């Protein structure tokens, strides 16, 4: 019998085998069907949005008469027309689907049009007259802090006596860092199709990471019970967090128009509208004061994290909590105060994004460690090493969770050897000494990322497994497939339990009428939750089948084995399909649900203490860059990554997630820049003005290694570890390498002034600043040798 500790193995497509994505061939041939590829049902209407041009304005009136007079226009809806409650908040309340009373950001949906064609709908949008009375907006984090404008309550985590320890420390430094936001830039934009049913219920096809939340949001808007709304998702063309809460607005508007007209309605946002209307990664303003000793060891830290939440709370509270809980990253902080301020601004509500606040928390301390190194004359490697988590008592996080599975020192040592870091550092120093224009930089970033949802309630998963009399299997679970390979991983788990080939398992669309009350596919917990739930369901059926086989083969049930498509007992065996047929003949159920809840976790939001994470995922990256000091342009030369995935469910999928996550992370810290003008209008809302990494931005030499022989110490599915979000943070190594290259201009004796994203313009400004300050320095001192 299998357990969740280790897969049985022996199957070409079972757990632990690097098989391709279940839709890979469909993707590369263009035959994968997304919502916009589905045959349009008879009578389908197309929807478009009327959005506010103002960042903050009172809505004095809406006149849709000219739009309704256009041939082919079926309906125009505003907040006043909503039959239920105009609220689609994922956690708090008062987050309108359509603006009511005031428009609170430029791009907020004020009304929606449904017409016979998309062209007519877009034409009608221009004919809807909205009377606005502009109001003074709050646009920046600084303005919000001054006005004490917050989307939810500020957060505070305190341990020990940070003020006293900072005051008593031999050295004290302060600094500030700004990190930018990031657009999700999924390939498939936000889209939903709502199909009203003759019994008054509603079917919604939605590109969402959270079908249950869409179900609840649509039900609230229409005044229906949850059971009257079914939400289905087969696949998404990317999500990255952008379709966790924001997709509810799109589905809700489509459903409202379908309710009003009695006809199917599809709402698809074009790229420009998508970027203007929907939320981003949170940008942060980070201030810190640290006390430390001659060895670089931190005695006390006081840090403020202020983030732009946008016009409503959305998921800002949870994002900020995760940022607060990841400031430590791999460093032990004995006495610390971390303050979090969720700023309300008249910009789009920022939302979930891969890493969910973790990247912003982790990047916060890196300039601080650099500053300590400069001040003490130590190498950054020495400062980092002396502050790493270690054995008790240096194993306790600021929020009270022990780091029980700490392997970061071993990872860093292995990376140094495998990537030949000491020799490369010497070579780079020699190169820089002889190069007046091109400078190289090399930096390492270690990673400790907590796995689980911040809210313990969300750490649950469900699955439904059906076995048919020909031995084929139907699999359904609460997770959604956005390209990350979740579906194939869970199918591999089921294949392993039954010991059948992967192609015998039919993967089906996620649907709220099959597995109810699901959590979002987020927090890197998709495989953990749904894999365990599917394992439980399949094991239930397998145990029933073992009883049937035992009777037929004349052995005890515990002597029955499933292997390579056969069911064996003693010297006899039957095929898996034969046993399935026998079970049906004997009236034994071949259908089962499975459920899983993550153990051990708990959290007290008031005190910011507990065990919010089931375990930690670890990784380390070393990146090398070259910058042109005359232009600020740069190239990524090489990156080496060692990543901890536990016992991998699918090494091929995991490697792809590591590579993709890293590239998305380097995009965040280098080139992806969001810019709003002084009227609060987003001006970087298309590929022409918003740059994401391309093939030339990937390091020319890119080496990714999965840490071997490292099963998860916690009983996850086959002792695997999450891999969706953690690799993104490894992209921070590129930003640190750029800073290292700039620092070489000052002999590594001065701190670097370089926010994220480090665009060429910012790099050039940092270079000029470093040159100016370095000119006033005395002769260079020698850094202490790296140990």
Image: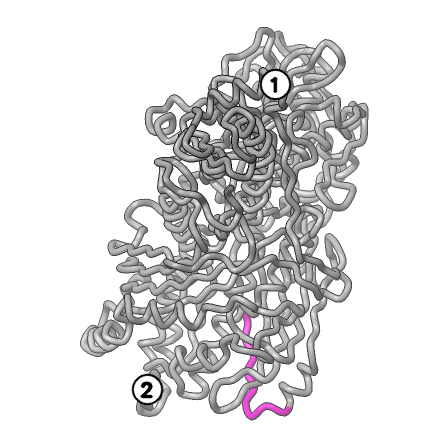
Q: What stretch is highlighted in magenta?
A: 168-176
Instruction: Give the Cα distance between marks 2 and 1.
Output: 75 Å
Q: In which quarter of the image is the C terminus?
A: bottom left
The residue labelled by disc 2 is: 785
Give residue 334's quadrant in the image. bottom right
Give the quarter of the image for residue 434: bottom left
Q: Dot 2 surroundings within 10 Å: few (below 14), some, or many (20 or more)? A: few
The residue located at (71%, 23%) in the rendering is: 229
Count all numbered tags in the image, as a single digit. 2
In primary-sequence order, the first of circles 2 and 1 is 1
Q: Disc number at residue 712?
A: none
Q: In the displayed structure, does residue 28 sit left or right of residue 314? A: left
170 in the magenta segment: yes
| Horizontal and vertical percent position of residue 141 | 63, 59
Residue 440 belongs to the span the image colors magenta? no
Q: Using residue 351 as the reference point, say whether residue 648 is left or right of it.
A: left
Closer to us: 267 or 14: 14
Secondary structure beneath dot 2 equals loop
Tell me if residue 757 can be seen: no
For residue 586, which numbered disc appears in the image? Answer: 1
Give the image location of residue 517, x and y in percent: 70, 35
Measuring 36% from the left and 55% from the top, which residue is drawn there?
Answer: 706
Instruction: Tell me the mark number nearer the camera, choosing from 2 and 1.
Output: 1
Look at the picture and state if 311 lies above or below 446.
above
Q: 3 above or below 557?
A: below
Q: Which of 600 and 119 is in front in this view?
A: 600
* Residue 133 horizontal/vertical position (percent): 75, 38
Identify the element where label 1 is drawn.
loop
């Amino acid at each position: 019998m299998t357990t969740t500790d280790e897969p049985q193995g022996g199957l070409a497509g079972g757990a632990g085998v690097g098989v391709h994505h279940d839709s890979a061939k469909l993707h590369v041939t263009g035959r994968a069907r997304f919502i916009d590829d589905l045959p349009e049902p008879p009578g389908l209407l197309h929807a478009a949005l009327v959005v506010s041009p103002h960042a903050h304005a009172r809505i004095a009136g809406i006149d849709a008469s000219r739009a309704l007079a256009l041939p082919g226009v079926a309906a125009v809806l505003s907040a006043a027309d909503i039959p239920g409650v105009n609220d689609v908040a994922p956690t708090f309340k008062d987050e309108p689907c359509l603006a009511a009373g005031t428009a609170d950001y430029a791009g907020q949906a004020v009304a929606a049009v449904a017409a016979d064609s998309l062209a007519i709908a877009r034409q009608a949008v221009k004919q809807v007259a909205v009377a606005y009375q502009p109001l003074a907006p709050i646009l920046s984090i600084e303005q919000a802090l001054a006005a004490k404008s917050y989307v939810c309550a500020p957060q505070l985590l305190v341990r020990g006596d940070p003020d006293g320890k900072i005051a008593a420390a031999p050295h004290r430094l302060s600094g500030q860092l700004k990190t930018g936001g990031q657009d999700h830039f999924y390939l498939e934009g936000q889209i939903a199709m709502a199909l009203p049913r003759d019994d008054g219920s509603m079917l919604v096809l939605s590109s969402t990471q959270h079908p249950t939340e869409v179900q609840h949001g649509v039900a609230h808007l229409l005044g229906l019970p949850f059971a009257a709304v079914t939400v289905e998702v087969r696949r998404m063309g990317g999500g990255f967090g952008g379709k966790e809460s924001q997709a509810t607005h799109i589905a809700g508007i489509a459903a409202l128009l379908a309710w009003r007209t009695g006809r199917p309605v599809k709402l698809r946002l074009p790229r420009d509208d998508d970027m203007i209307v929907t939320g981003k990664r949170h940008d942060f303003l980070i201030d810190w004061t640290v006390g430390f000793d001659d060895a670089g060891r931190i005695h006390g830290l006081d840090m403020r994290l202020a983030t732009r939440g946008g016009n409503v709370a959305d998921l800002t509270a949870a994002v900020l909590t995760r940022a607060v809980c990841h400031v430590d990253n791999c460093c032990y902080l004995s006495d610390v105060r971390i303050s979090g301020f969720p700023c309300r601004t008249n910009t789009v509500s920022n939302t979930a994004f891969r890493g969910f606040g973790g990247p912003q928390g982790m990047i916060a301390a890196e300039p601080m460690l650099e500053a300590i190194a400069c001040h003490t004359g130590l190498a950054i490697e020495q400062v980092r090493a002396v502050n790493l988590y270690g054995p008790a008592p240096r194993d306790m996080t600021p929020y009270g969770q022990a780091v029980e599975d700490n392997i970061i020192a071993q990872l860093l040592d292995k990376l140094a050897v495998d990537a030949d870091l000491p020799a490369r550092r010497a070579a780079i120093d020699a190169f820089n000494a002889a190069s007046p224009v091109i400078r190289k930089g090399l930096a390492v970033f270690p990673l400790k990322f907590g796995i689980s949802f911040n809210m313990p309630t969300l750490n649950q998963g469900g699955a439904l497994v059906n076995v048919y009399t020909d031995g084929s299997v139907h699999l359904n679970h609460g997770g959604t497939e956005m390209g990350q390979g979740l579906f194939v991983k869970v199918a591999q788990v089921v294949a392993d339990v039954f010991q059948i080939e992967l192609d015998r398992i039919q993967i089906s669309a996620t649907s709220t009428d099959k597995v109810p009350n699901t959590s979002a596919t987020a927090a890197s917990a998709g495989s953990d939750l749904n894999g365990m739930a599917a394992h439980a369901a399949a094991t239930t059926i397998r145990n029933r089948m073992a009883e049937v086989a035992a009777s037929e083969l004349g052995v005890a049930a515990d002597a029955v084995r499933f292997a390579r498509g056969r069911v064996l007992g003693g010297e006899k065996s039957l095929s898996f399909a034969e046993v399935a047929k026998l079970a049906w003949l004997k009236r034994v159920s071949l259908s089962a649900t499975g459920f899983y809840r993550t153990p051990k976790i708990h959290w007290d939001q008031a005190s910011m203490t507990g065990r919010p994470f089931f375990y930690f995922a670890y990784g380390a990256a070393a990146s090398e860059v070259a910058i042109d000091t005359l232009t600020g342009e740069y190239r990524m030369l090489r990156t080496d990554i060692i990543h901890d995935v536990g016992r991998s469910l699918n090494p091929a999928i995991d490697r792809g997630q590591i590579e993709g996550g890293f590239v998305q992370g380097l995009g965040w810290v280098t080139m992806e820049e969001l810019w709003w003008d002084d009227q609060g209008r987003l001006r970087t809302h298309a590929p022409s003005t918003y740059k994401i990494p391309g093939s030339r931005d990937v390091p020319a030499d890119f080496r990714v290694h999965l840490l071997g022989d490292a099963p998860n110490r916690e009983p996850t599915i086959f002792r695997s570890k999450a891999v969706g979000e953690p690799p993104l943070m490894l992209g921070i190594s590129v930003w640190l390498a750029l800073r290292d290259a700039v620092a070489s201009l000052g002999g590594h004796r001065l701190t670097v002034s370089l926010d994220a994203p480090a665009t060429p313009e910012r790099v050039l400004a940092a270079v000029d600043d470093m040159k100016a300050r370095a000119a006033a320095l005395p002769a260079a001192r020698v850094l202490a040798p790296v140990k």
